[in-house]
Amino acid sequence: MRVNTAVLNRDVREARKKPAALRHIATLTLALGLMSTVNPSTACKDIRLQVLGSGGPELDDGRSSSAYLLWQGDSARLLMDTGSGSSTVFGATDARFTDLDAILLTHLHTDHAADLPAFIKGSFFSARVADLIVAGPMGNDRMPDTDSFIMRLIGPEGAFAYLSSYLEPDTESYTLQAVTMPATDPGQLDGNGWQARSLPVQHGPIPAVAWRVDIGECRVVYAGDVSAVPDDFAVFAQGADLLILHAAIPENAGPAARQLHMTRGGLVSLANQVAPRHVLLSHFMTRSAHTVPERFRSLQASFSVARDGLRLEPG
């Protein structure tokens, strides 16, 4: 895997605009292992997304927190976010940790990153030998950057210091490489047959990035938790076969919730501007679940409603 240092402006160790689809309401309440096919694009042949977590940080919503697997053929290539409970759902799939090329984090809230140590520890029982990149956002006075986050979790003085050997070359069967993406500009990671670009987005005061993954000829854009996006987001997401949006709050949400998340109206406006082939709505909470799907009928693209374990063919 190669990290584009010209874009990232940092060293890392050795390492389309389509017309909007016809309006079509596709409500999905699928259980683990069921597949949804939504007229997949030929560009996305052999590509599918699997939801490991479709909820937020609540304890009683019956969902794991945010996490998505991007498959190519029979290999799970990329893991986007590692929210609480996602490692358990991962274990119920056919995915192999040895196949993962990278873990891409949108931000470092527990409902997006809490299971990272569980994945690392669980990998001890796998046959993984290739180094693993874990990439995520910059930091600020409230949150650490991704490098520091990893050190605080599994570094020699970290909460799970017994896993620190995964940060030391030639100690375990593979080495974890933390990558902090740029704070103000797009960043880029290059893998074998895929490219991932990050774009800083607004999640209240919490540093966050959106991810755009081009794998084969297929493009998946994961906005993550956003209260606002930069003016160039539509250009960043242009040509998306699948756009993942988080519908965490209702239209009548209070100011605290609006500081962290877009309402339904904002999400619809954003999706219609991007004009993806398909939208996946996720990150539901008790306060927002009742708004789906009726209040998203003004989406110009077809859409699906996420459930843990859902497998979706992009486009």
Image (cartoon, helix red, strand yellow):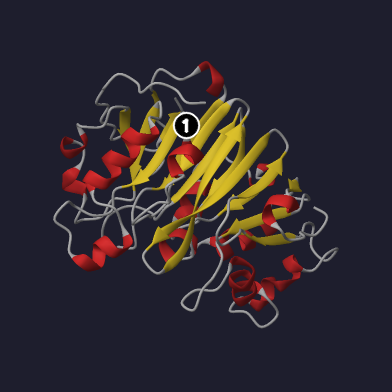
Q: Tell me what residue is drawn at x 24 percent, y 68 percent.
A: 256
Give the total number of marks visible in the rendering: 1
Q: Is residue 7 visible?
A: yes
- Label 1, secondary structure: give it: loop
Indicate the position of residue 144 as horizontal and vertical percent values: 55, 73
Instruction: Give the labeled residue for mark 1.
Output: 240
Question: In the image, 284: left or right of 291?
Answer: right
Q: Is residue 306 visible?
A: no
Above or below, comparing residue 299 to residue 7 in the picture: above
The crowd level at tag 1 (other Cα within 10 Å; few <14, some 14-19, many 20+) is: many
Name the residue nearer the viewer: 55 or 149: 149
The image quadrant where one finds the N terminus is: top right
Question: In the image, 42: left or right of 23?
Answer: right
Q: Tell me what residue is drawn at x 77 percent, y 57 percent.
A: 174
Indicate the position of residue 7 as horizontal and vertical percent values: 68, 51
Question: Which residue reaches farthest right?
Answer: 170
Q: Please, what is the three-letter code of the amino acid marked with disc 1?
A: Ala
**Residue 282 figure quarter:** top left
**Residue 275 figure quarter:** top left
Name the residue nearer the viewer: 297 or 46: 297
